[in-house]
Amino acid sequence: MKSKLILMCAVVAVSVSLLACSAPAKQASVEVSCDDFYKQAAISQEVKVPADSSLTVTLCSNPTTGFQWEEAQISDQTVLQETSHKFVSPESEPPPPPGTPGQEVWTFQTLKKGTSTISIDYSRPWEGGEKGTWKFSLTVVVE
């Protein structure tokens, strides 16, 4: 019994040591809710991220209103590159009622040290539709 306890303690100690020595996750995230945009239609932020890391930007979105986030504009694509963009529906039990906002999620990869700005507008894309109702700008400083 005593040898099993010693063995278990040794396994736990090694596991904790390995976790403590592992490299920190190289990712950052920024999230803006619908409430934030209702308070301020144009939001500008800054984030510092390490080189060779990922950045996730999550913005409130409700395509049932006809609005959508336009393509992300990146000021310096040698510093930052978009790797994915998707809409994420709200999940709950029971399912949310139609028209419940979800989120649009962009993932970016940092490529080298420097500064780049991501700009995205929330608009109705058709001709004559409302343009730039919400605006999001993120200055990304890659260190």
Image: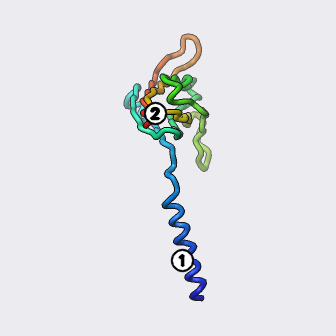
Few, some or many residues within 10 Å of mark 2 (<14, 14–19, 20+): some
Few, some or many residues within 10 Å of mark 1 (<14, 14–19, 20+): few
Residue marked by disc 2: 113
Foreground pick, 100 / 69: 69
Foreground pick, 135 / 114: 114
Residue marked by disc 1: 9
Residue 118 horizontal/vertical position (percent): 48, 27
Amino acid type assigned to the residue bearing label 1 in the image: Cys
- Secondary structure at badge 2 equals loop
In the displayed structure, would residue 91 be above or below residue 142? below
Residue located 53% across and 25% down the image: 77
Q: Quadrant of the N terminus?
A: bottom right
- Secondary structure at badge 1 equals helix
Q: Is residue 67 visible?
A: no
Amino acid type assigned to the residue bearing label 2 in the image: Lys
Q: Residue furthest top?
A: 128
Foreground pick, 54 / 35: 54
Residue located 50% across and 59% down the image: 21
Q: Is residue 22 visible?
A: yes
Residue 133 horizontal/vertical position (percent): 46, 21
